[in-house]
Amino acid sequence: MSRTTTRAGLTYATRPGSRPLQLDLHLPPEGAHPAPFVVFAHGGGWSTGSRDVVGPGFADWSPSPFDRLAAAGIAVATVDYRLSGESTWPAPLEDVVAALRWLRGNSTRLGLDADRVALWGESAGGHLAAMAGLLGHDPDRGAGRVRAVVDWYGPADLLGLSGQLGPGAPHDPDAADSRESMLLGAPLRTVPELAADASPVHHVTAGAPPFLLVHGRADRLVPARQSELLAAALADHGVPVRLEVLDGADHLWTGSEDAPAVAFDLTTSFLLEHLT
């Protein structure tokens, strides 16, 4: 594999009363610049997680998924954002958007192509990637249009979550202390307008970028129905969308030995198609 480089701990924003917000930039080999790039948002229920983690299915991957994408010619910026214990909606979206703005504004010195940009995330990060991609056209809430979005098992309709969960679900989204309620800063059902604002299905427009949605059919935390609803909304607006539901895979691709590699290969092919 060609030699890649990583620039770690780049501060892209500072917020009053908050830690510096940083990203790591995984760059393709020299000679491949300016490189297209993808911004990756980690999972963790908006309450935990960090920019260097993709999920347990990739813990023993060497090189990492980020370095593998970089070796394929696509730079990867992995970003931290404010968690629900630090701030509430729309803070994490604002941070992902700020990271994208910073990367575009500094693209020349970083060796990046500001026009060939995509977003990618898993779980809560997939939700944030979808939101940032759908709001790219909004001068106040977005950071410009991107060429593609990859969303791994991200929530798409917060108010619909509880009705889609099966028996034995590991949590109740409507509970006052749920991940969703903590994100919003209030019990989910008491702030329906805010919950709708934080739901990608309510922000789909005809000008949205192409989407790849990958979900586990056995996901007990975020039902696959969430990605199916987002795929349907995108298709209804004429947006190119590919939905892949992986049999046997639960959240984080657990329960399936093959799912992590399948999801990553789908992602790599999709990003190469739209960025190179």
Image (tube, rainbow, N blue to C red):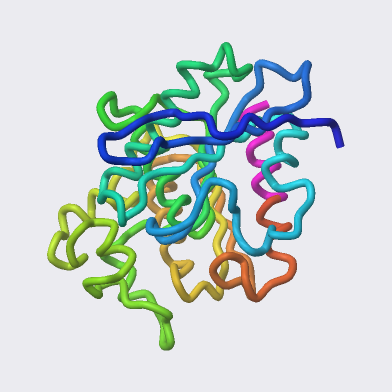
Figure check: 6 above or below 237: above
Is 268 contained in the magenta span? yes
In the image, taking residue 78 as reference, residue 227 lies left or right, namely left
> Which range of residues does the magenta coloring cover?
265-276
What residue do we see at 49% from left, 24% from top? 103
Residue 243 lies, in percent from the top left, at: 55, 55
Q: Quadrant of residue 221?
A: bottom left
Q: Name the main secondary structure of what is drawn in magenta.
A: helix
Q: Extreme left residue here?
A: 190
Residue at image x 38%, y 29%? 13
Image quarter where the N terminus lies is top right
Name the outermost residue toward the right: 1
The image position of residue 137, as x and y in percent, is 34, 27
- Spot occupied by residue 185 in the image (x, y as percentages of width and height): 20, 58
In the image, what residue occupies the spot 45% across and 40% down? 239
For image coordinates 34% across by 49% down, the residue present is 200
Q: Quadrant of residue 135?
A: top left
Closer-to-camera residue (276/71):
71
